[in-house]
Image (spheres, rainbow, N blue to C red):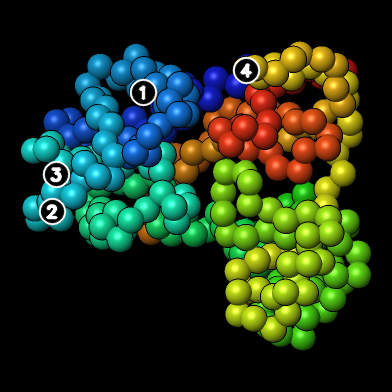
Amino acid sequence: MPDSNCDVLLARGLIAAWKAYNNPMAVIMFVIEEVTYNVYDQRFLEYSIIKQSSGAKVIRRKFSELHKCTLQDGKLFVDNLEIAVVYYRTSYAPDQMTVKDWEMRLLIEKSLAIKCPSIQYQLAGTKKVQQVLAQPGVLERFFTSKVTIDEIRRYFTGLYSLDLTPEGNRAAAMAIEKPDAFVLKPQREGGGNNVYGEEVRKTLTALKNKKEREGYILMDLITPPVNPNYIVKADTPVKLVDIVSEIGIFGVVLGDQDDILENYEAGFILRSKKVETKEGGIAAGFAALNSILLV
């Protein structure tokens, strides 16, 4: 199994964006939470940037520290520093943002700074877009090779719209009848948001013909292989338990409407949790980091 090296590879992508901005005096800005618990991987990434490029400077700012940032001829300035790249480690959930923060996000989006992610990429990663991509005929808009399309579809599980349409009503009825076969997903990230089991039936019954139902998608419940292992967590006795795991692949894409400058795989992460645990976020406390052993 190759080493992940995701800190080096992801840092390389941010450096490429900084170089593409074409001003060596501009800086990379990490936008962080008001209270940051998940700081270690951020620092690893920051140190990797500094190690790989002596010219790139990294600053860290909370949204509350950006309320006086300005645009000058489209360029973004924070504390008199021109910003080449904005790397978001927050703004992925409504409770992370105030009205003023959203105003700052809009200002940043209007700037010439390279955003990671831009609002378009962030929306492309939502559950609803995943569900739409799984619909017949949609992948064909982006790929011409049937071999490629079939290969991508091999990795799709069942994804269903819950829009207030006949199709959405059929999906809701299907899940109400067999709630243990599905997971109900809102447009959220980070763990602690999905609905499982009997709660799927209760939630969909309560939402029946309400507009709020369209904020969810329905997905077939994946049943991964179970393995015995140990999970080490603070203030928790260490003992042998049954776990399930999920691998995530990092990637870097840098480009504009005309050209793709970088597009590569950038390592992986393996999350593991107890088999009875429904959610899977590491920072949320549901899962733990793991290593891959091929057998």
> What secondary structure is found at the residue carrying circle 2?
strand
Q: Position of residue 240 (x, y in %)?
A: 85, 16
Label disc, if present, on residue 77 of the rendered structure: 3
x 62%, y 32%: residue: 285
Q: CA distance from mark 2 to mark 1?
A: 25 Å
Q: Residues within 10 Å of mark 4 (few under 14, many from 20)?
A: few
Label disc, if present, on residue 46 of the rendered structure: 1
From the image, tell me which residue sits under label 4: 234
Amino acid type for the residue under numbered disc 1: Glu
Q: CA distance from mark 2 to mark 3?
A: 6 Å
272 and 122: which one is in front? 272
Q: Is residue 171 above or below residue 269?
A: below
Amino acid type for the residue under numbered disc 3: Phe
| Nearest to viewer (mark 4 / mark 1) | 4
Please say whether residue 140 is visible from this viewpoint: no
Q: CA distance from mark 4 to mark 3?
A: 41 Å
Q: Is 208 positioned to the left or the right of 86 in the image? A: right
From the image, tell me which residue sits under label 2: 71
Q: Are marks 4 and 3 in contact (CB under 8 Å)?
A: no
To which quarter of the image does residue 249 belong?
A: top right
